[in-house]
Amino acid sequence: MTTASKITLVRVAFIPLFMWLMYMSGGETGLWMWLSLAVFIIASLTDYVDGQIARKYNQVSDFGKFLDPLADKLLVIAAMTMFCEWGQFPAWALMIVLTRECAVTGLRLVAVGKGKVIAAGWSGKVKTASTMIGLCVLMGLPQLDILRWIIIAVIVVTTVYSGVEYFVQNWNCLWED
């Protein structure tokens, strides 16, 4: 197993700890939320670090291509789910994110079945980064309603845009035999 994949596994291992800390916070700013934020930031930074290591040391692997985006999705969805439970993130926005993630994953699976690999696109990376940063802001400043709605809008717009872009650029994977 590569170093990059091990770092990705650390991100996955942080998810239960992150969720427990979020649960303990009860959605209120305080020690538990700040600890949640710290774990989320560390986990989010591992996404950047594992990617840099994989590219620099030629550690790109099929396992890493599978696990890295899955780890990102699980971390982000864990945070959104907790915010949704507390009424701070609308269920419809969470559903848009979940739908996009399932659809793009399905598209990638179809492509793999045809011997093609769909690499992460620039818009997908922007979506991931803006979502992670936005969720960090929500953890640090949950009481600012206007900021919360701006963050939700950014998450939804980047999610939809990147999802549409994946399908437009890879539409042929669905129809070629």
Image (spheres, rainbow, N blue to C red):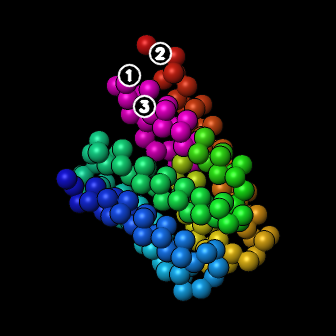
Q: In which quadrant of the rendered view does residue 87 lie?
A: bottom right
Nearest to N terminus: mark 1 or mark 2: 1
Q: Magenta segment, which residues?
A: 100-123
**In whole angstroms, how far apart are the C-alphas of marks 3 and 2?**
14 Å
Q: Amino acid at mark 1?
A: Lys
Determine whether 70 is above or below 37 in the image: above
Determine whether 165 is above or below 14 in the image: above
Q: Amino acid at mark 2?
A: Glu
Question: In the image as oriented, which residue stretches furthest toward the left?
Answer: 1
The percent position of residue 175, horizontal first and vertical second, equals 52, 16
Q: Say which residue label 2 marks.
A: 176
Question: In the image as oriented, which residue stretches furthest toward the right?
Answer: 146
The nearer-to-camera label among 1 and 3 is 3
Query: Closer to the camera, 174 or 71?
Result: 71
Q: Amino acid at mark 3?
A: Leu
Nearest to N terminus: mark 3 or mark 2: 3
93 on left or right of 139: right
Q: Residue at x 54, y 71 (%)?
A: 23
**In whole angstroms, how far apart are the C-alphas of marks 1 and 3?**
9 Å
The answer to whether residue 167 of the structure is visible from this angle is yes
Q: Residue at x 43, y 49 (%)?
A: 69
Could you classify mark 2 by the number of other residues whose Cα lies within 10 Å: few (under 14), some (14-19), or many (20 or more)? Answer: few
Could you classify mark 3 by the number of other residues whose Cα lies within 10 Å: few (under 14), some (14-19), or many (20 or more)? Answer: some
Q: Say which residue label 3 marks.
A: 109
Q: Residue at x 67, y 66 (%)?
A: 86
Query: Closer to the camera, 125 or 67?
Result: 67
The percent position of residue 122, horizontal first and vertical second, equals 52, 48
Q: Say which residue label 1 marks.
A: 114
